[in-house]
Image: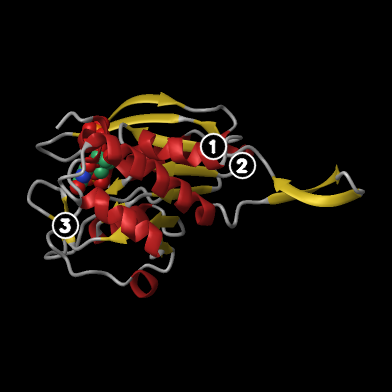
Amino acid sequence: MNGEAFHEPPGLCRLTAMASASNEFPTVRVFDHPLIQHKLTYLRDRATSHRPFRALLYQIAGLMVFEATRSFPTTEVEVETPIERTRARKLAGKITVVPVLRAGLGMAEGILEVMPEARVGHLGIYRNERTLEPIAYLKRLPRDLDAGPCLLVDPMLATGGSAVAALRMLRDAGAADLRLMCLVASPTGIRRVLFAEPNLTVYTAAIDRGLNEQGYIVPGLGDAGDRLYGTA
Ligand code: PRP
Ligand code: URA
């Protein structure tokens, strides 16, 4: 983990141009699947209330995890089918999904639907509304985080402060095989995360234009936690 301070180059902090995922950020995978984009459009829509918002976030996370787990290690096992004994593959190691509270919880539930064997660690982090600095208030993680892949989930990667704080907490707790899954990312957030973790694989459904003066992603979808839980 890079311990130096991150300084966004002047002019890039606000309303940056749309980044090309493949060229500018080689370790960032953007999910351009029509079904995911279709659901994301409803999430963006301000008219979508918390109930459908929650269902859509759950569904998208379930779809994204299918691809995000593609490189997870597997192990060969023997299984008795009704016809004969054969070799087959199972996920290896202990998989840990770590949502960042609050909004990450909405994604974690969708992921667990597809991957119920995963363990869940929790990180509570919120942004100070004025400074936009992350404030960590909760950490409940399995002891052996290095026993398998660890998937950090948070729908919004805005300034990147919360994600970098979460990644640091996971590294300090022993996570070795670490990936980040979000829904909407800003170029600033991606740069900040990759400055801290240059080889990190980041999964996202969209890289938006940039950030506004309040640190919200534009066009974004607003405050994910508030929209998810109806607390706006
Ligand atoms: C949101 C979001 C991320 C963070 C992203 O959480 O879920 O954790 O903001 O912003 P950043 O990249 O600039 O750090 P929020 O602070 O709103 O907490 P909450 O969901 O508990 O309200
Ligand atoms: N947190 C959110 O929930 N939305 C944003 O756009 C930025 C931070």
In the picture as drawn, the residue positioned furthest to the right comes out as: 84
Amino acid of disc 2: Gly
Q: Residue at x 57, y 44 (%)?
A: 149
Marker disc for residue 96:
1
**Badge 1, how many Cα within 10 Å: few under 14, some, many 20+?**
many
Residue under pointer 2: 148
Expressed as whole percent of the image width and height from the top left, the position of residue 29 reads 42, 63
Amino acid of disc 1: Thr
> Could you tell me how far apart the alpha carbons at marks 1 and 3 are, in whole angstroms?
31 Å
Residue under pointer 3: 219
The answer to the question of whether label 1 and label 3 lie on touching residues, with beta carbons closer than 8 A, is no
Whichever of labels 1 and 3 marks the residue nearer the N terminus, that label is 1
Expressed as whole percent of the image width and height from the top left, the position of residue 28 reads 40, 62
Q: Secondary structure at mark 2?
A: loop
Whichever of labels 2 and 1 marks the residue nearer the N terminus, that label is 1
Amino acid of disc 3: Pro
Whichever of labels 3 and 2 marks the residue nearer the N terminus, that label is 2
Q: Nearer the viewer, residue 108 or 163?
A: 108
Q: Secondary structure at mark 3?
A: loop
In the picture as drawn, the residue positioned furthest to the left comes out as: 213
Q: Nearer the viewer, residue 187 or 164?
A: 187
The answer to the question of whether label 2 and label 1 lie on touching residues, with beta carbons closer than 8 A, is yes
Tell me the quarter of the image containing the C terminus: top left
Expressed as whole percent of the image width and height from the top left, the position of residue 127 reads 21, 36
For residue 35, side relative to residue 42 (left or right): right
Q: Residue at x 57, y 35 (%)?
A: 116
